[in-house]
Image (cartoon, rainbow, N blue to C red):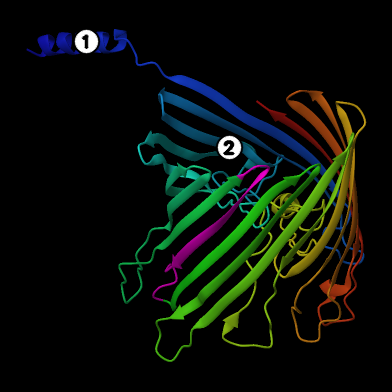
Amino acid sequence: MKKLFAVLLALGLIMAFSATASAVDVKFGGSYYVVGVYDDNPSLKKDAYSRAYFFQRIRLQPVFEIAKGLTFTARMDAMEGAWDTSTAAGNRSAQSVDTGRNFDWERGYVTFNTGIGKFDVGYIAAGAWGTVFGDNTTTRPRIKLTTKAGPMILVAIYEKRNEGNTVAAPHYADADYDAYYLAPIYAFKGGQAGVLYGYLRNAIGRPAGGSMKFHILEPYFKATFGSVYVEGEFDYNVGKFFESEIPGVADVDWKGYAAYLMARTSMGPATFGAQVGWSRGNDITTANDVESGLGGGADWNPALIMMNDELNTWSGGDTNTANSGKANFLLFNVFGDYKVTPKFSMGAAFTYAKIDKDVVAGQISKDLGYELDVTATYKVYDNLSYMVGAGYLWTGDALKGANPAVKVDDDYILMNKLTLTF
């Protein structure tokens, strides 16, 4: 009987493997970059230290087309981090002590069209909306519906940021972090405009104290007028930074603002423009409220040193590169680019930034500093480019806080970046 069962099983496996497989069209995309950096004074202090390092990332994104209107998308990042480091510092995936061997299967979601619109379900892109300002592109589990009505696009999203129950008494069954979004987008000739509404409830802090509940409203626009392109965004959040569940402990209100405007134009091979970004700071003279804006976001990198997210992530932990947190600031930036040949271009940018509100009582100065950047990019192949850049930061006295004895110093950076897309 056992022999008969084994024969039947073998025949079944042969039939299964020899059967005609359903047709699946697989498209692979991805990228690779490696960056070399020399940072003369990352701490911005007098007589401090310099740092030289490399960091890289490999990204693969296969898309499986199972049927017309039905796809499955995945994304994997590997070997992301600084070259040959022995600690997990600066390793976003944190899956291996050796940052040269980490692997992060970051996304996996199904996309399917229905009579009411397109659904994306699974771990999908999150944290980006409107313009690049305020964006922190990441991956989160979501259910997203996108539908169209003429020139109008309507997006509805449910997002799970944390699923959990509290382990300390009282044992709340709900310690979740959920987000709900609704966004209409209107497309018109030469541009688009939209507004994102979101309600977010963060109960991770229960039962130690309470929850965070707040609303966001983020209108934006993008428009082209002849040779001039303009985009802008306004971010507003209001709610409870801390809604207490402890008798006698007061709530903490939250209301923040941030704004951004950028314009650029082209004249032959030259492109130039300007941008301004602002995130309201917290008024330290008031109690039981938080007034800071949502910030400029990790994706918005207006300069090579100031508010550059890659430096803040991979430099080994330096966090005082002129307000790398991108909150509580006012920044002005002018930039230009000249295409010398179809494959070679040069660029330059000048940036000034200051804090919006004093960080400590008796703040000496609001100036974060001035920065001049120059870059040159050569397209080796259509999918391979090489960039070299240099930046110099004249450090402002805002980093002294209220202590005039603190000595700050300037910083300069030299970098080169090789980027491959496929």
Q: Quadrant of residue 232?
A: bottom right
What segment carries the magenta color? Answer: 188-207
Please tell me which residue lies in front, 65 or 228. 228
Nearer-the-camera pick, 289 or 48? 289
Tell me the amino acid under the disc marked 1: Ala
Amino acid tagged 2: Asp
Query: In front of the other: label 1 or label 2?
Result: 2
For mark 1, give the secondary structure.
Answer: helix
Q: Which residue is mark 1?
A: 10
Q: Residue at x 64, y 38 (%)?
A: 100
Q: Position of residue 271 (x, y in %)?
A: 86, 41
Task: State the residue at coordinates (21%, 10%).
Answer: 10
| Quarter of the figure with the C terminus | top right
Q: Position of residue 129 (x, y in %)?
A: 59, 52
Query: Label 2 belongs to which residue?
Result: 77
Label 2: which secondary element: strand
Residue 173: x and y, percent? 30, 67
Q: Is residue 195 magenta?
A: yes
Residue 123 included in the magenta stretch of the image: no
Quadrant placement of the N terminus? top left
